Amino acid sequence: MHACPDSLSKIPPLVAPPALTRFGARRYNAWNDEVRRRYGGRVQKVLVAAGFTCPLSHPRISGLAIGTRPDCLPDAVLDHLAGLARTHIIELEVGVESCDDAALQRVNRGHDFACSADAIHRAAQCGLAVTAHLILGLPGESRTSMLEGAAQLSALPVRALKLHQLQLVRGTAMARDWQRDPASVPLLEEEAYIELLADFVERLSPQILLQRLGSEVPPSLKLAPQWNMRLSALAPRLTAELARRGSWQGARFAAARA
């Protein structure tokens, strides 16, 4: 059966949601895409150990990405970093790890979510770009609290986010707890993490850049979980799950705020 040209012309074309059009095939706000737009190509981060003079004087060093805890950011430190940011790229990475105070206490983090929120607000007031770190799957945290964390982070002046799945490192207190009683430290399997990741990203502000979707502990140090999936597979797996749902980053963001 063939439709006549007139009837075809009356069918409106499919139009992707604005957010989906902006994100392209990835369906989320990827850090790498933003870097290419801003700098015209790849920017490489090089890890350096502290304990020597600052490398800002090296001709091939354009700036610093500094990772720290929220309770290690007094105003004097933020003021100093803000001064450096006037002439160099300064990225401040803050280890939030969880938005649930019970989970933070369970892992003996030593600070609450209010401490993270305060540090992020003060850093933003100094004009610093903040990347938050978050671990999905900490013991004592429910699926509901993890998804609520997307809305809580979205309410802060966070520019980018690094997500990590919970991994157990040999010799740590949490690893010993798991060895004594695996039920005390539930671990996410691959499929469950992808599903949780997609649920989280749907509730996250579309303005926040996703700089990392997971992490890898060296095999010699990692006790569990033992996934067959490499870190490089996370991005396409997330995109595939969002495509399967017909979804994208921020698809449920407005509903989460209501």
Image: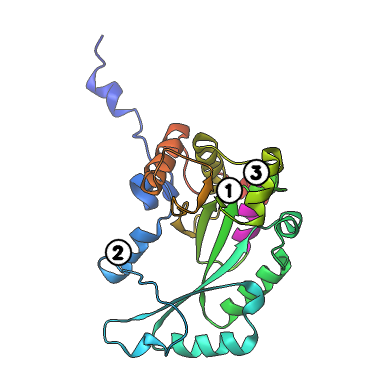
Residue 204 in magenta?
no
Q: Which residue is mark 3?
A: 179
Q: Which residue is mark 1?
A: 203
Give the number of the mark in front: 3 or 2: 3
Q: Which residue is mark 2?
A: 36
Label 1 neighbourhood size at 10 Å, few (<14), some (14-19), many (20+)?
many
Label pair 3/1, CB-CB below 8 angstroms = no
Residue 94 place in picture, x, y as percent: 57, 69
Q: Residue at x 37, y 47 (%)?
A: 26
- Secondary structure under tag 1 reads loop
Q: Residue at x 33, y 90 (%)?
A: 57
- Secondary structure under tag 2 reads helix
Whichever of callouts 3 and 2 sits on the residue coming sooner in the sequence is: 2
Residue 138 visible? The answer is no
Q: Residue at x 66, y 69 (%)?
A: 116
Q: Nearer the viewer, residue 139 or 16?
A: 139
- Secondary structure under tag 3 reads helix
Residue 109 place in picture, x, y as percent: 69, 64
Residue 218 place in picture, x, y as percent: 44, 54
Q: Nearer the viewer, residue 190 or 256?
A: 190
Label pair 2/1, CB-CB below 8 angstroms = no
Q: What kind of residue is marked 3?
A: Gln
Residue 154 in magenta?
yes
Instruction: From this view, report whether residue 112 is shown above or below residue 79.
Output: above
Find the magenta span and give its range: 147-155
Q: Residue at x 34, y 65 (%)?
A: 35
Snapshot quadrant of residue 39: bottom left
